[in-house]
Structure formats: C-alpha cells, structure tokens
Image: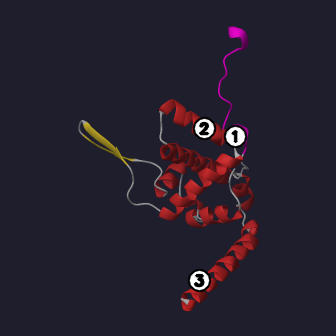
Amino acid sequence: MLARLTQLEAVCTAAGHLAKAVEEAFPRHPDAEIMLSLPGFRVQLAARILAEIGDNRPRFVDAHGLKAYASLSPVTRASGKKSSITGRWVRNDRLNHAGYLWACASLRASAGAIAHQRQRRREHGDWHLVAQRNLVNRMIGKLCHCLHYRKLFDEHTAFPPTWLPPLDGIAT
C-alpha cells in the first residue's frame, strides 16, 4: 500500500509540473489569444483542444471535417429509397470529451450559449446530452471560423439576438 501511495504521489507531482508547463507555454502560442477569447476556454482546456486538432490548418478544410473528427456530425447512408442516419463509431475520444467539457464551461461564461441550449431543448424537445452535443457542434464551428479568419470571438456575432415581436402588437 505504501508503494502505491508513493506512485500516486509521483503521478500527482508530475501532473502538477505538466499543468504548470502548459500555463507557461500556451500563452506564447500564436493561436492562444484567439482561443482564449472563446467563452469557457481557460488555458488548460484550450491547450488540450489545440493539442488534439493540431497546428496544421489545411488538415481540416472547414468546420465539417473537424466536427467529423470529433464525432459531432452524423453519418448518413443512403441506398435507393432507404437512408439511415447514425452516429460515428470511429472518433477522437479525447477531443470529443474536451468538447463536452467546453460546452459545460461555456454555459457558465456565455449568455448566448445558455440561450442556444435552452432554445434547442425547449423547441426541439432534445435531451440534455443531445442539446449539449449541438452546442459543442456550434462552438467547434465558431472556433474554426475564428482560427481561419484570425479573429477574436464576438458574442453578438456568434449568437445574434433572437427576433422579438414588435411592442404593442404594432408591426413596423
């Protein structure tokens, strides 16, 4: 038991050193400012997602490729009059998991993300995980857009206000 405790202590110490190294190195990355502008990203989570998607920008031509890599987009198979839509079996589990962590964190940091998730759940009757997957899907798209165009995240552009009916029932 003492040997196991010694091993556990060594692992915890190594994890602490790794976290400190990430905290020091990530802000110097060229994409760090863009990634940290997205809601819910802190240094550790942003570094984890960047490590999974990599620095090779042509690797994913558009957001659809990255969403497929993270297993966020479904597979559609059609033959004749029959078609089926299923989930992906082959995926990057680490990126998928980091995406769900990002969705939870973005719900605490973005009013637009909260409104999007509530709207999806209310209007479509989605279960919590389905609505969360939809939010991750949308946020991955926003990340790809920001990285591709080298722009910081803007809450009002990403989540425009929903249409409100005119006051007093008067059409304008």
Per the image, the residue denoted by label 1 is 111
Type of amino acid under label 2: His
Residue, x 48% and y 51% (percent of image)?
72
Type of amino acid under label 3: Leu
Q: Where are the magenta residues, as a range?
A: 154-172
Front residue of 83/9: it is: 9
Instruction: Give the mark, 1 or 3, whose residue is nearer the N terminus.
Output: 3
State left or right for residue 147 relative to residue 132: right
Does residue 103 show up?
yes
* Residue 133 image label: none
Magenta span dominant secondary structure: loop
Per the image, the residue denoted by label 2 is 116
In the figure, residue 7 lies in which quadrant? bottom right
Q: Residue furthest left?
A: 80
Relative to 127, say whether 50 is above or below. below
In the figure, residue 98 lies in which quadrant? bottom right
C-alpha gap between disc 1 and disc 3: 40 Å
Residue, x 73% and y 52% (percent of image)?
37
Residue, x 67% and y 39% (percent of image)?
112
